[in-house]
Image: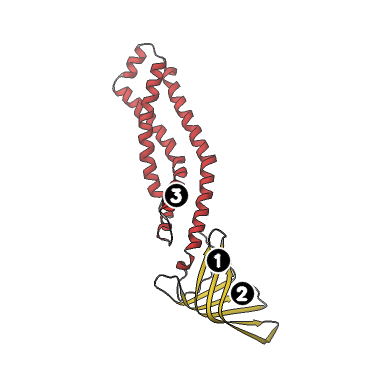
Amino acid sequence: MKTLRRYVFLEILGPFFLGLLVFSFVLITRATGKPLELLVQKNVTLQEVLLIFIYLLPGVLTFSIPMAVLLGILICFGRLSADSEITAMRSSGVAVKDLLLPVITFSSIAFLVALSNSTCWEPKVNYRFKLMKNNIALRSISTEVRPRVFEEQFSNQVLYLQDVTADKSRWNGVFLADIANKDKLEITLARTGYLISYPSERKLQLHLSQGAVHSVVNKSPEVYRLTTFDQTDIPRRYPAYKNL
């Protein structure tokens, strides 16, 4: 009887792995649409490209494992029925429970694997995936700022660029309005500038050259301050990304 149960178990195992491979491939190609946008970002390493597909795998397995189990059971008993092996087993006195036991055992193992994947592995991987997307976006933020467009993705700040270089690493004609303090409006104008990112420290720093800071106090509108600079560094807050 053990030989018969092992035989049915192995008959399910083969189609299961084939179905798992096919279903996972189909699902992961549909799930990589939005994450693949990261591949066109600047400074994306080969290791990060591979990690994108690895991080998507747990979410895909949540759906592909049950589908592969069902496919394996259907193909197994479909073949046994087509070859009249089930009829021969029943004629030899094999009970239905003896045929169902390997099915229940296989389904229980697949259930435990899927449960541990969805409750343990998938949340941890999703968290790491989000951190990696934040780091990629932080490194390539300077390439996302468009010229001649008022950018409001920085908290309480409005950035406007007259022009950018071909590689988008340096800006020309920088206009920066700080509206965090409504009682003290501050506008910074600079001839050139660029953004420095520190992903490990999760910091941004704006480096400006040949410019001036204009500030007005609302409570005293007659007070107008002008401060010129040759070089200056301004710490910036994280941009408010909605897709991360």
**Residue at point 42%, 16% (across, down):** 2
Instruction: Report if residue 244 is visible in the image.
Output: no
- Residue sitting farthest toward the front: 230
Task: Looking at this view, name the residue that lies furthest to the bottom.
Answer: 222
Label 3 and label 2: CA atoms lie apart by 39 Å
Mark closer to the observer (3, 2) = 3
Nearest the viewer among 189 and 148 is: 189
Q: Residue tagged by mark 2?
A: 179
Q: Which residue shows up at 29% across the image and 23% down it?
A: 82
Q: Residue furthest right?
A: 219
Of residues 57 and 88, the one drawn nearer to the viewer in this rendering: 57
Residue at figure coordinates x 40%, y 45% from the top left: 27
CA separation in Å, label 1 and label 3: 25 Å
Q: In this view, does 130 lie above or below 10?
A: below
Residue wearing tag 3: 51
| Residue 228 in the image, given as x and y percentages of width and height | 58, 83
Residue where numbered disc 1 is placed: 204
Q: Is mark 2 on a helix, strand or loop?
A: loop
Kindly tell me whether residue 221 is visible in this rendering: yes
Q: Quadrant of residue 163?
A: bottom left
Mark before the other along the chain sequence, 1 or 3? 3
Query: In front of the other: label 2 or label 1?
Result: 1
Amino acid type, callout 2: Ile
Query: Callout 2: 10 Å neighbours few (<14), some, many (20+)?
Result: some
Report the amino acid beneath label 3.
Leu
Disc on the earlier residue, 3 or 2: 3
Q: Residue at x 49, y 62 (%)?
A: 139
Indicate the secondary structure of the residue bearing disc 1.
Answer: strand
Expressed as whole percent of the image width and height from the top left, the position of residue 206 reads 54, 71
Quarter of the rendering occupied by the N terminus: top left
